[in-house]
Amino acid sequence: MKQSWGRFERNAPDGMEDLDHNTAPSVIDRYYTRWYKTDIKGRNGEDQCVLQHSNRICVITLAESHPILQNGNTIKSINYQISAGCSRLENKVSGKSKRGGQFLTELAPLCRITCTDEVEYTIYSCIRGRLLEVNESILERPELLLQQPLTEGYIAVILPKIEECKTVTSGLLSREDYENILSKRASVTQHGPQAEPEPC
């Protein structure tokens, strides 16, 4: 599937391009609901975002708090080869029903990203569904992942089953809950962990 998430953003309804971007909601916030999964597999700060459209399509991205996007990191490599016998680049779908795509569970790895400090991060699907496409553009231009993680730098697009579309995000956090977690992290960083009260 060669239709890219970046094209979704550019195809805004007529007239939207003329709106005042200081007051108008972004295309993402207007047409997609943001969901988050934090500290994936117990790894502190390794957070991801799922952008859910009303047509069931879910776009998997890095959350802005992910370590890859912090501290001026740069990317050395992005690898969609999950194992010797499994490459997300070999995913094939066909027809309106998108048959043939790899089926993913919530913790199925999508790719592995290595930064120039040699730290490797695994990016997961976060939801159950059929893989529609991965973003091959970031293989040639990894800076997209750093500069535009929610749009041109997305990781993959997943289509949940029809019968699961209303429950597929049940294990994820709303944007408000995610921001509360970020606030708590910032408080711990600033003031340190609170000591447990001594028993009476």
Image: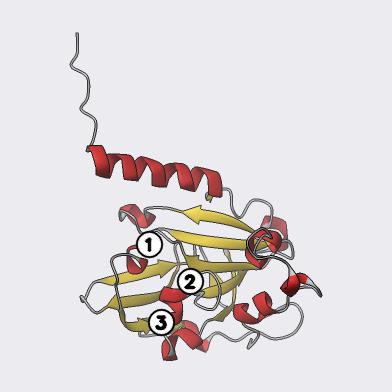
Relative to 167, is 176 on the left or the right? left
Three-letter amino acid code at the position of disc 3: Glu
**In front: mark 3 or mark 1?**
3
Q: Which residue is mark 2?
A: 149
Which quarter of the rendering shows the N terminus? Answer: bottom right
Compared with residue 142, is residue 169 higher up or lower down, i.e. above or below?
above
Q: Nearer the viewer, residue 162 or 32?
A: 32
Earlier residue among tags 2 and 1? 1
Q: Residue at x 44, y 84 (%)?
A: 87
Residue 127 visible, this angle: no
Residue occupying the far bottom of the picture: 140
Three-letter amino acid code at the position of disc 2: Pro
User: How many angstroms separate mark 3 from mark 1 (CA)?
Assistant: 15 Å
Q: Nearer the viewer, residue 59 or 125?
A: 59
Residue occupying the far top of the picture: 200
Q: Which residue is mark 1?
A: 66
User: How many angstroms separate mark 3 from mark 2 (CA)?
Assistant: 9 Å
The answer to the question of whether label 2 and label 1 lie on touching residues, with beta carbons closer than 8 A, is yes
Which quarter of the rendering shows the C terminus? Answer: top left
Provide the secondary structure element on which disc 2 rests. Answer: loop
Earlier residue among tags 3 and 1? 1
Compared with residue 138, is residue 72 higher up or lower down, i.e. above or below?
above
Three-letter amino acid code at the position of disc 1: His
